[in-house]
Amino acid sequence: MLYLTQSDIISLNVSMSQVIAAVEEGFRRKGLGQTQMPPKIAIHPRGSKTFLHAMPAFVDGLDIASVKWVGGADDNCERGLPTISGLLVLNDPDTMFPLAIMDCIWITAMRTGAANAVAMKYLGPKDARDVSVIGCGAQGRSNLLAMAALYPNLQRVRAYDVNPAALEAYVAEMREQTGLPVEAVACPKDAVLDAEVIVTAGPSPRVPEPFIENEWLKTGAMAAPVDYNGSWCTEVYETVDRLITDDHAQMNYYRAKHYFENVPLPYADLGEIVAGRKPGRQSEDERTMSICLGIAVNDAVTAKLVYDTARERGVGLELPL
């Protein structure tokens, strides 16, 4: 089997546009009923500040079977470690033998940004030029890369983080990486007002303390929370014209754990929209919201893209089983 480190994966230079295309196809097949994906299986070794998730998926037609074993620890920043870590195993769907084991940090970040880009394609403005990111960690970075790939005419990017050092580093890094005029703002309101798409990528607390008010989200804008219901006030969820998620079963799983208690039921999941079974945005005046929780199908299709590219280029270490 092939072993791919994080540096191996990064060296492949797989583009965000490639990941978006793979993730969109994964959503299409999910919407057509061509996937198997139970909700996340979770344990919490040190209570609510830690998690380990098992995330299996099979994508029929693409011959992809995988499981991601991903962990998160809120205190890792104090240890000088990333919050998220883990491994993904890609299996042969005929023999069931593992084809590859690979780091999943890059995959998790990129597929999350890509999933939001797919949601923006179907629910967001057609040609956004003014976007915002609140929460300047790994997901804030990948989501801006995704928006840059989706919206070629971006003219303004506003960013906010409660940590001034993190905000400063984000602005400098993302200006260089994207060539976009990324600017720091002093508060969340300054980020949200007049923005066409707003990504929130902060913590996802069990008991949220929302701070983004309904009247800040303008007509025609899209909200894309990565942080579950951690940032947006209940009134926003209740009054947007279209509210979707990436998977109904997974959202119900989190409702049972007391997330999204005041959030209405989504009218569709993203797979249903991509597959043409339910409508996406119908008017440029609609306010929309997509709650992408992160699904195993997205991991599977992204891992297959990485695996195929690595095989083509001879990257990685062959290991005996």
Image (cartoon, rainbow, N blue to C red):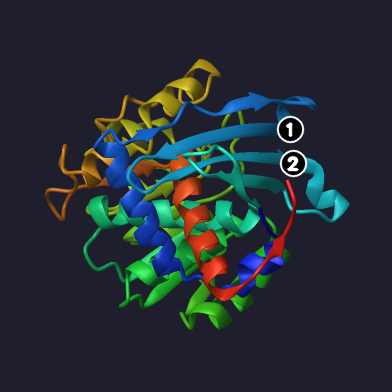
Up/down of 52 relative to 25, above or below: above
Pointer 1: residues within 10 angstroms few (<14), some, or many (20+)? few
Residue 48: image location, x then y, percent: 71, 27
Up/down of 103 relative to 179, above or below: above
As drawn, the label of residue 74 is 2
Q: Secondary structure at mark 1?
A: helix
Q: Secondary structure at mark 2?
A: helix
Q: Are marks 2 and 1 in contact (CB under 8 Å)?
A: yes
Up/down of 25 relative to 182, above or below: above
Q: Amino acid at mark 1?
A: Lys
- In front here: 187 or 93? 93
* Residue picked out by circle 1: 49
Residue 179: image location, x then y, percent: 48, 83
Residue 276 seen in the figure: yes
Residue 193 seen in the figure: no
Quadrant, the C terminus: top right
Count of numbered tags: 2
Residue 117: image location, x then y, percent: 37, 57
Residue 193, quarter of picture = bottom left
Pointer 2: residues within 10 angstroms few (<14), some, or many (20+)? some
- In front here: 180 or 148? 148
Q: Amino acid at mark 2?
A: Asp
Residue 114, quarter of picture = bottom left
Q: Residue at x 54, y 29 (%)?
A: 40
Q: Earlier in the sequence, mark 2 or mark 1?
A: 1
Up/down of 237 relative to 78, above or below: above
